[in-house]
Image (cartoon, grey):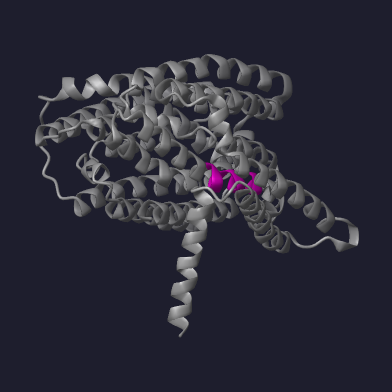
Amino acid sequence: MWLGAAKVIVNLLALLSTLVLARFLTPADFGLVAIGTTLLTIIGAVTDLSLASALVQRTTVEDAHFHTAWTLNIVRSVLVSMVFCAISPVVVYFYGDERLFGVLLWLSFSIFLTGFNNPKMVVLTRRLEFWQDFVQSVGQKLVGFVVGVGVAFLYQSYWALIAGALASQLSGVIVSYVVCPYRPRFALSKAAELWGFSVWLSLGQLVNILNWKFDHLLVGARLGQEALGHYSVGDNIAGMPTRELVAPIERTLFPGFARIGGDVSRLQKAYVSAQTMVCFFALPAGVGFAIIAQPLVLMAMGERWLPIVKVIEFVSVTVALQTVSSAAQPLAMAGGQTKMLFKRDLTSFCLRIPMIIVGLHLGGLFGLLVARAVSTIVSIGMNMYVVKTMIDLGFVKQLRQNFRSIVGVLAMAAVLILVKGALNQGATSISPAMSVLLLVPLGGLVYFGVSLVLWVFSGKPDATELVVLNAGRTVLRRVFRSSL
């Protein structure tokens, strides 16, 4: 509940920030900063030590482990900042824009700040306590929102994006020590123990980031900063509904699966329960968001941002489809199978990057989006293979668990597409805002209605639908009692 509430608030702030900044800034402004943030993300992944995951996975953790993690993170952040500053002249020359020098310089300070984050926050994750995480994530996002929007309002410059990011990072570091007191010391005594778990996870993270961010660099180099601005903003907005519904659940799965340990039968049951819940909520959110993308963009951002509609439609659906197997990551991490994850990520990288390059070369931005969709189908199959290998749950069984959600989404999509087309015909055409207000509740009613009917015909199994119904009954009882 804490993680869910945090994600809802954080993403509402993120979406609101994007919509407000889009009114003050141009797509080229977003594209300029996207070049720097993409490079920062890639370089950060190259040196990511995944120490937090190592601390969660360990059975016993001493103060020396936290001191070592804090020390290693600071050393890493200093080195990455120096490298980032050193490559800035090369980046400026490659993209032919001197403004990138200042952008990269200040973004390097952002990665420097991350090294000072409180490593003891993982103690709360191990205990499945998340209210402190709520305070940190919401607090830093709120600060970043206020600073970013304030600078945009005053100066209408791309510096608003950088100022918001820096303010958010700094406030997050401060809050981490407020909600979880910790006095760090320089130490390296447990470096070997932590690195033994995290090495494969770090390599996998590197490959993953290259896999999912390399296309941004290609778009910027081949199609220009304005096209990159459209692509990066659309990509970011498209994943919000799905990622934010999935992330709170998946944050609890890693420590939850780790507690179960090597009990395969319990892991199978826990995985199926978690995966069906993720898919039940995230799949309709992603597909529905893709369908309302055009009226939503027109309503919130204006006609100059219409090119991002196609990006949102493709990416939102592909991100939603990934939820069919997304719990494979925390399952493998809980079992210490980080080497298996690295092999999966490396295979995905070797397949996806050539697809992206060919798609961009043959079809421009549209070809790139098609290539992303194809690569997503491949990654789903690899995730399902990881699950089968770890807990002996076959491909058919994994898909069968999500049958009701898939049918419900197909029914919802068919109804919404038909209604959307009818609403936009000739004299009966309505405003984008009214279209969104009509389509969203209609999609929810169709999806939940079809899913519940299928659940009843399936014999009312102990599944996500039962959880939703029980939660609904509880809410209604409380509302009824309070009204009396």
- Magenta includes 212? no
Q: Nearer the viewer, residue 393 or 144?
A: 393
- Horizontal arrangement in the rendering, residue 366 relative to residue 214 (left or right): right
Q: Quadrant of residue 300?
A: bottom right
- Horizontal arrangement in the rendering, residue 451 relative to residue 166 (left or right): right
Q: Nearer the viewer, residue 295 or 290?
A: 290
Q: Position of residue 434 (x, y in %)?
A: 72, 64
- Magenta includes 287? yes
Q: Quadrant of residue 5?
A: bottom left
Q: Position of residue 11 (x, y in %)?
A: 48, 52
Image quadrant containing the C terminus: bottom left
Residue 105 seen: yes
Residue at image x 41%, y 41%?
250
Q: Nearer the viewer, residue 7 or 108?
A: 7
Find the residue positioned furthest to the bottom. Answer: 484
Residue 155 seen: no
Magenta stretch: give its range.
279-289
- Horizontal arrangement in the rendering, residue 36 relative to residue 186 (left or right): right
Q: Position of residue 338 (x, y in %)?
A: 34, 22
Image quadrant containing the N terminus: bottom left
Position of residue 75 relative to residue 315, above or below, is: above
